């Protein structure tokens, strides 16, 4: 394990703290809910869903967080303002976890930010996302919403090298600042399974060392796009591949992970807690101690 030489920022979103040196805070897990194709979503445009099943998923995340000491947030995926209004309201009333506002369309993202403002939930929200090319209109709209935390993408479609990621990240951070973002969460932008996916993993260390912001990435689609895994590994055993993928990110210093569907909490949370415990134990040799008494190391060695 290693200690970063630069100051490592810790940001608070709602009641969850994200960032710091390895071993100080556990990895924050971000699980997706209301994603397109999720069985409980009956009409994605109108935001019609099975409330009992949604509550079961929310409770599952909370239960495993209580057991493991691993904090979490919900990645709320919406396609329309109507749907977002229902989704945000439901999750906010059933959990005090941070709420990530996630949509493909900038217009829909801006609409979600406006809804969050009207509901008084700005301090609990994570905007997804700022990246090179975000318009001034969108940046201004986010600033108006009062949301202070956002994912900032180190995604360079033309150059996926480390230098390429760092080049676009400076511009993306500047745009986020224009949008009133004071708590950037940097996403090293791992591509779907490809030979160059390791660059995003390597970038975690360099990004944290240079900028000091909480850093992570989305691992939910990595294993699902691995042709070799789909061809050779039965579905019931693929969880091992995903667990290995998450663990690599944690060991490299990731502060947060978007792990995919929140339904997977049963097996993702325990694995994350075990790796966080190893990391915290190792960092003790470098005089780094957990900042919270709820850290997984205190759960595992109870």
Image (spheres, rainbow, N blue to C red):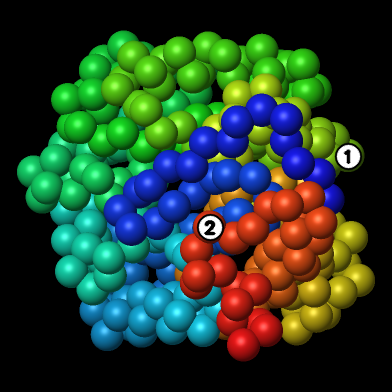
199 vs 255, nearest the viewer: 255
Question: Which type of secondary structure does the marked residue at label 2 adopt?
Answer: loop
Per the rendering, the mark at residue 291 is 2
Question: Within the image, what quadrant is residue 250 found in?
Answer: bottom right
Asked if one can make out residue 222 in the rendered structure from this viewpoint, the answer is no
Task: Give the answer, above or below, for where 199 lies relative to 257.
Answer: above
Which of the two labelled residues, at mark 1 and mark 2, occupies the earlier sequence position?
A: 1
Task: Give me the residue at 44% from left, 27% from top.
Answer: 130
Task: Give me the residue at 22% from left, 63% from top.
Answer: 92
Asked if one can make out residue 214 in the rendered structure from this viewpoint, the answer is yes
Q: Is residue 87 left or right of residue 13?
A: left
Label 1 Cα neighbours within 10 Å, binned few <14 / some 14-19 / many ≥20: few
Task: Give me the residue at 71% from left, 74% from top.
Answer: 274
Image location (x, y in percent) of residue 224: 71, 60
Image location (x, y in percent) of residue 12: 38, 47
Task: Give the answer, above or below, for where 56 lies relative to 77.
Answer: below
Q: Is residue 128 left or right of residue 170?
A: left
Task: Give the answer, above or below, for where 66 lies relative to 157.
Answer: below
Question: Within the image, what quadrant is residue 162 found in?
Answer: top right
Label 2 Cα neighbours within 10 Å, binned few <14 / some 14-19 / many ≥20: few
Q: CA distance from mark 1 to mark 2?
A: 37 Å
277 vs 85, nearest the viewer: 277
- Residue at numbered disc 1: 195
225 vs 272, nearest the viewer: 272
Image location (x, y in percent) of residue 99: 33, 54
Q: Is residue 161 left or right of residue 210?
A: right
Quadrant of the drawing holding the C terminus: bottom right
Question: Which type of secondary structure does the marked residue at label 1 adopt?
Answer: loop
Furthest-front residue in view?
Answer: 287
Image location (x, y in percent) of residue 239: 74, 74
Per the rendering, the mark at residue 46 is none
47 vs 198, nearest the viewer: 198
């Amino acid at each position: 394990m290693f200690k970063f030489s630069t100051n490592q920022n810790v940001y608070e979103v709602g009641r969850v703290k994200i960032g710091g040196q390895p071993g100080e805070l556990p990895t924050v897990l971000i699980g997706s809910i209301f994603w397109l194709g999720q069985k409980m979503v009956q009409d994605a445009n109108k935001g019609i869903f099975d409330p009992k099943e949604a509550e079961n998923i929310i409770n599952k995340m909370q239960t495993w967080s209580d057991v493991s000491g691993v904090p979490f947030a919900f990645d709320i995926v919406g396609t329309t303002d109507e749907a977002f209004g229902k989704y945000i309201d439901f999750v906010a009333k059933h959990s005090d976890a941070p709420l990530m506002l996630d949509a493909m369309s900038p217009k829909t993202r801006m609409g979600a930010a406006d809804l969050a403002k009207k509901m008084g939930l700005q301090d609990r929200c994570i905007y997804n996302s700022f990246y090179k090319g975000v318009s001034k209109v969108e940046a201004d709209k986010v600033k108006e919403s009062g949301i202070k935390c956002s994912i900032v993408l180190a995604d360079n479609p033309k150059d996926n090298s480390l230098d390429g990621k760092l080049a676009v990240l400076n511009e993306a951070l500047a745009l986020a600042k224009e949008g009133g973002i004071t708590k950037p969460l940097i996403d090293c932008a791992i591509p779907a399974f490809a030979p160059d996916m390791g660059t995003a993993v390597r970038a975690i260390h360099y990004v944290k060392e240079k900028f000091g912001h909480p850093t992570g990435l989305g691992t939910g689609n990595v294993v699902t796009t691995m042709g070799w895994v789909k061809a050779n590994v039965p579905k019931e055993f693929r969880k091992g591949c995903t667990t290995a993928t998450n663990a690599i990110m944690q060991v490299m210093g990731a502060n947060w992970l978007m792990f995919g569907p929140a339904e997977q909490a049963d097996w993702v949370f325990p694995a994350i807690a075990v790796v966080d415990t190893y990391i915290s134990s190792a960092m003790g040799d470098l005089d780094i101690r957990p900042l919270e008494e709820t850290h997984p190391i205190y759960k595992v060695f109870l």
